[in-house]
Amino acid sequence: MSSLLSSSSVGLFTEQAFLSHLASQPASAPAWWIERKRSAFARFSELDMPSRTDEGWRFSSRETLTLEGFDASSTPPADQAAASIDLGEVAASLTFLDGVLTARTAVSAELSSKGVVVGTLREALAHHAVLLREHFMAQPQKLGSEKFAALHTAFVNDGAFIFVPKGVELSAPIVVTHGSRGAGTRVFPHTLVVLEEQAKATVIDLFLSPDRGAAPPNPGHPAAFACGANDLYAGQGSQLVYAAA
């Protein structure tokens, strides 16, 4: 991996930052997971930033688009949690702050006995590696450009992993909340949902910040950087209702 990277193309997502991220991955992470990340970082480093000539950016402003100035830390303060919204009864919930799981409501014993899984990507690496390898970022991801899709794969720290087996129906929604600490931070939200044949589930995906009511950052101070993705798979005859906000 070349260390001669253009600062304008990688910002603070440098080779050193990537190697630090790799070091934070679980020791038990399979080789294919690490290799995907390495390949993704190489693609990210080689690709140019989007330009006005790209179809998806023809009518978009690039003036504030930057990869500079974002905190490389992925560990939120222990006394912080992402903001939340009371949505009533839920089948399960997961809350992430800066890519780290901070709270959860587990599925009931009944749903667990039927094979329903509501967990994290890191847990899936250990217990559902085959499903994860088959479905993680397997669909083309727009994310503004291929460069940002590669950036997401390279630096995603954790996310939601939801699996509903064949014929199982959930009467209450699964709620996933991703958050960041606000200005200057960077986060890579990810939600992966797999429904087998004739399954039924509702997934509500939220992105919130604990300081969402705070004043905007000072001029020149970078806003938060969020590069999120989802993988949604619904088997034949299944019904997945997915809502994001």
Image (cartoon, rainbow, N blue to C red):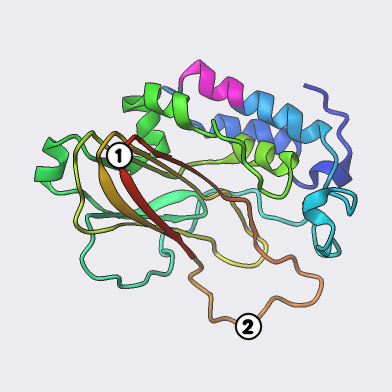
Q: Secondary structure at mark 2?
A: loop
Amino acid at dot 1 = Gly
Please say whether residue 33 is one of the residues in the magenta stretch: yes
Furthest residue toward top: 31
Q: Is residue 158 left or right of residue 228?
A: left
Q: Identify the magenta region.
A: 30-36
Q: Which residue is mark 1?
A: 237
Q: Position of residue 133 (x, y in %)?
A: 46, 24
Q: Nearer the viewer, residue 11 or 240?
A: 240
Instruction: Say the numbered circle drawn on residue 7.
Output: none
Marked residue nearer the N-terminal end (1 or 2): 2
The image shows residue 82, relative to residue 75, as above or below, that is: below
Instruction: Say the numbered circle drawn on residue 215.
Output: 2
Q: Position of residue 232 (x, y in %)?
A: 44, 42
**Residue, x 89% and y 38% (percent of image)?**
6
The image shows residue 102, relative to residue 115, as above or below, that is: below
Q: Position of residue 49 (x, y in %)?
A: 83, 46
Q: CA distance from mark 1 to mark 2?
A: 47 Å
**Residue, x 86% and y 64% (percent of image)?**
63
